[in-house]
Image (tube, rainbow, N blue to C red):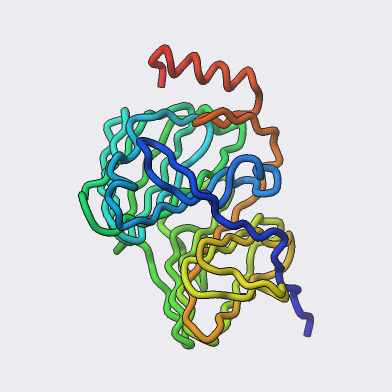
């Protein structure tokens, strides 16, 4: 019987403290400097604090063009509003998939004044053919994210993509993304057949895990960019582990990036800035 090689860790990223919006403290796991290696992913942030001063300012109205933002909440509540009339309350276990495309102006504000605020935001690029399409907003309540329980006690929440025949609720996207939230008991293994050619990451939420045949472990606030081919094989140690699996089909297109705009050329970026200033978003 043929053995499919495992994906190993190609690059281990450790989060960098930063802030965004109105002073919200973040851990930036992935930024646009790695966009070529991380294609189709552009940015990945974790916000996690039980100090209100770290998050109370939220993210006042700001524009996006040319990509998608994905928010996944672990704890706390954020309110979303945008200039297309969409509103949403992001609570624990919920997700939001917002396709900014040709332009949206949105804001995210905490709807709590104390307690833990914890979640993740991922930026997913759009192909040039879809960068100027209509914006779309999808709010996904916790109960609408299916959870698969495996015989060994592993639990897998399927936000997008497919796991063991269970599909996530996100509508089909051009990068064929996969986003899984996996809770693995102690001394257990997890295997998943990733689509060939997909760029894939494993992000450590808690505990410690081994990926493929790589000697180094992935811990909390660490993100592993995996090698290009093979299946995913993860092992937990003597404690339970939780991790996110994020994967997508590379676009292999030129990237021009400035602040909240991600296009293919510098001219398109300048046009985006002009359009936003002229109120055309």
The residue drawn where x is 29% and y is 64% is 143
The residue drawn where x is 42% and y is 79% is 149
Q: Work out which quarter of the rendered image holds the C terminus and state it.
A: top left
Q: Nearer the viewer, residue 230 or 176?
A: 230
Spot occupied by residue 273 in the image (x, y as percentages of width and height): 50, 18
The residue drawn where x is 51% and y is 61% is 221
With 148 as the anchor, is 7 left or right in this view? right
Q: Nearer the viewer, residue 259 or 138?
A: 259
Total marks shown come to 0
With 249 as the anchor, is 160 left or right in this view? left
Spot occupied by residue 125 in the image (x, y as percentages of width and height): 57, 40
Does residue 30 sit above or below 274 in this rendering?
Answer: below
Q: Work out which quarter of the rendered image holds the N terminus and state it.
A: bottom right
Spot occupied by residue 15 in the image (x, y as percentages of width and height): 55, 54
Q: Nearer the viewer, residue 77 or 85?
A: 77
Does residue 112 sit above or below 189 in this rendering?
Answer: above
With 53 as the anchor, is 280 left or right in this view? right
Q: Quadrant of residue 196?
A: bottom right
Does residue 130 sit above or below 200 in this rendering?
Answer: above
Q: Nearer the viewer, residue 50 or 45?
A: 50
With 94 as the anchor, is 14 left or right in this view? right
- Residue 172 visible in the picture: no
Spot occupied by residue 68 in the image (x, y as percentages of width and height): 49, 40
Q: Residue extending furthest right?
A: 2
């Amino acid at each position: 019987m043929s053995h499919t090689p495992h994906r190993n860790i190609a690059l281990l990223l450790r989060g960098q403290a930063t802030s965004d919006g109105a002073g919200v403290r973040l851990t930036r796991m992935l930024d646009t400097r790695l966009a070529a290696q991380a294609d189709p992913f552009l940015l990945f942030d974790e916000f996690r604090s039980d100090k209100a001063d770290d998050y109370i300012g939220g993210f006042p109205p700001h524009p996006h063009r040319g990509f998608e933002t994905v928010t996944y909440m672990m704890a706390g509540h954020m309110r979303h509003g945008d200039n297309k009339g969409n509103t949403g309350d992001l609570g624990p276990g919920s997700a939001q998939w917002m396709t900014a495309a040709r332009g949206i102006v949105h804001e995210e504000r905490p709807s709590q004044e104390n307690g833990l605020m914890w979640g993740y935001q991922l930026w997913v690029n759009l192909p040039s053919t879809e960068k100027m399409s209509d914006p779309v907003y999808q709010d996904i309540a916790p109960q609408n994210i299916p959870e698969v329980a495996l015989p060994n006690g592993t639990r897998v929440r399927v936000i997008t993509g497919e796991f063991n025949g269970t599909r996530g609720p996100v509508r089909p996207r051009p990068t064929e993304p996969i986003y899984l939230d996996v809770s693995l008991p102690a001394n257990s293994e997890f295997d998943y057949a990733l689509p060939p050619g997909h760029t894939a990451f494993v992000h450590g939420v808690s505990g410690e895990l081994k990926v493929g045949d790589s000697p180094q472990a992935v811990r909390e606030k660490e993100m592993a960019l995996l090698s290009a081919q093979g299946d995913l094989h993860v092992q937990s140690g003597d404690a339970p582990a939780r991790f996110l699996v994020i994967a997508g089909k590379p676009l292999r297109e030129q990237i021009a990036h400035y602040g909240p705009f991600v296009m293919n050329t510098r001219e398109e970026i300048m046009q985006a800035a002009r359009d936003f200033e002229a109120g055309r978003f």
